[in-house]
Amino acid sequence: MASPNLAKFAYQTLQQGKSLAGLAHKELSSKLMELVAPEAMPNTKPLTRELILQLRRSMAALEQLDWSEAEQGIYPKAQLFEAPWLEWAAKYPLIWLDLPSTWERRKKRNTRDIPERVVPDIYPDYYLQNFHHQTDGYLSNHSAELYDLQVEILFNGTADSMRRRILAPLKRGLMHFKGRSEESLRVLDVATGTGRTLKQIRSALPKVELLGIDLSASYLRQASKYLNNGSTELAQLIRGNAEEMPFANSSMQALTCVYLFHELPPKARQNVIDDCLRVLEPGGILVIADSIQKTDSPQFAKVLEDFPKVFHEPYYKDYINDDISERLSSSGFTNIHSESHFMTKIWSARKEN
Ligand SMILES: C[S@@+](CC[C@H](N)C(=O)[O-])C[C@H]1O[C@@H](n2cnc3c(N)ncnc32)[C@H](O)[C@@H]1O
């Protein structure tokens, strides 16, 4: 790695570049939508200057924390530069080609446009939808291949920085098992999607056994390409429902769960929390990352209210008002903490010994 100042400058420049690219894409694509598919335009008002400034300050604070936790050794600095640039460059035109079908679904309010070959009875009903108006929902390789880049654009290049906020509480939580070897610890990422969180965990905790579960075989296929392509230990990827996971009681020392809860109806949210408690060993830690909520981020209320107007997110409105700490506590978790970083809120909770 270059000298610390140079490396920090490179990181800041990279983040600014990603942010500008995300903003430019959104500006251009919404101009095009206005022109070609005006009926698909969401009914939202522009952000005020004050709100834009607040968002920028919050993003800068996230960037600063991301750098400082790397400096503290919570994860390697190389992690800050991790992005499959060539792959994303090759996929970028596909995002544009995909837009017209997205607008069509938005226009027709068609939110159940799922591939015909999908066998519905192996999925919960709430899952068979086009979250974010995404082509094929989560149920095709096409969707899985575009997902990471789409999220990167949506969050103006901050998605990985926000995901990384789980690493410090995860490592602190695992200190409970410090008498054991790192190799003997099992960390499961719930709703792992394309595996970006697992990759981050691997770089921070290279020896732990990693597992991921998700309902989408296509997303897991993508995760496998991303994670199981070198000489590192295999991450085990299992297709299954986070509400009733195919793992034994008390079989994991830590669980993470990133950006799942806002896509679940309230009952499923509670089921996932309850099942996390079941599979955790006593003393184990659960770390959740998801969208910020109304109570602790009232200054961003407009952004939170606009989000489900722009993207199909049927449970988001309920989620931003939900008391996740209360759910954790009613399930039996203790030591519940939460904190917010830009657009992401982190909860950590322990299963009592
Ligand atoms: C917004 S994505 C987040 C993926 C990943 N954690 C990330 O950070 O990018 C939501 C993921 O949750 C998965 N999912 C939704 N409901 C699920 C459930 N009941 N059980 C397991 N996975 C589920 C989806 O297939 C999708 O991969």
Image (tube, helix red, strand yellow):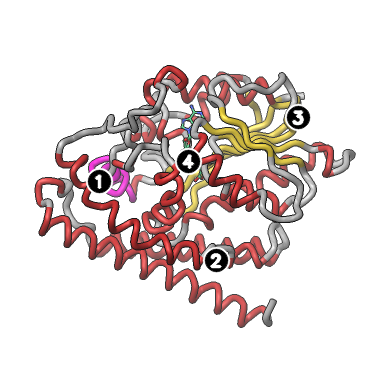
Q: Residue at position x 75%, y 36% from top?
A: 186
The answer to whether residue 236 is left or right of residue 155 is right
Q: Nearer the viewer, mark 4 or mark 3?
A: 4
Residue drawn 38% across and 58% down? 153
Picture disc at residue 64: 2
The quadrant of the rendering that contains the N terminus is: bottom right
**Residue range corresponding to the magenta coloring:** 300-309
Q: Earlier in the sequence, mark 1 or mark 4?
A: 1
The answer to whether mark 1 and mark 4 are in CB contact below 8 A is no
Mark 3, residue position: 283
Q: Is residue 343 above or below residue 71?
A: above
Where does the image place residue 259, in percent across and percent down from the top left? 48, 41
Residue at mark 4: C-beta within 8 A of ligand 1: yes
Identify the secondary structure beneath mark 1.
helix
Q: CA distance from mark 4 to mark 2?
A: 22 Å
The numbered mark, 4 or 2, whose residue comes first in the sequence reads: 2
Whether the residues at callouts 3 and 1 have beta carbons within 8 Å, the answer is no
Q: Which residue carries the number 4 mark?
A: 259
Find out whether the residues at labels 4 and 3 contact each other: C-beta distance under 8 Å.
no
Q: Residues within 10 Å of mark 1 (few under 14, many from 20)?
A: some
Which amino acid lies under the numbered mark 1 shown in the image of this protein?
A: Thr
Q: Give the position of the C terminus as an image quadrant.
A: top right
Name the kind of residue labelled 3 in the image. Answer: Gly
Residue 74 image position (x, y, % from top left):
70, 57
**Where is residue 169 drawn, in percent x and y?**
66, 45
Magenta-highlighted stretch: main secondary structure?
helix
Up-down: is 146 above or below 268? below
Q: Which residue is mark 1?
A: 102
Q: Nearer the viewer, residue 188 or 235?
A: 235
Query: Could you tell me which secondary element the residue under label 2 belongs to?
Result: helix
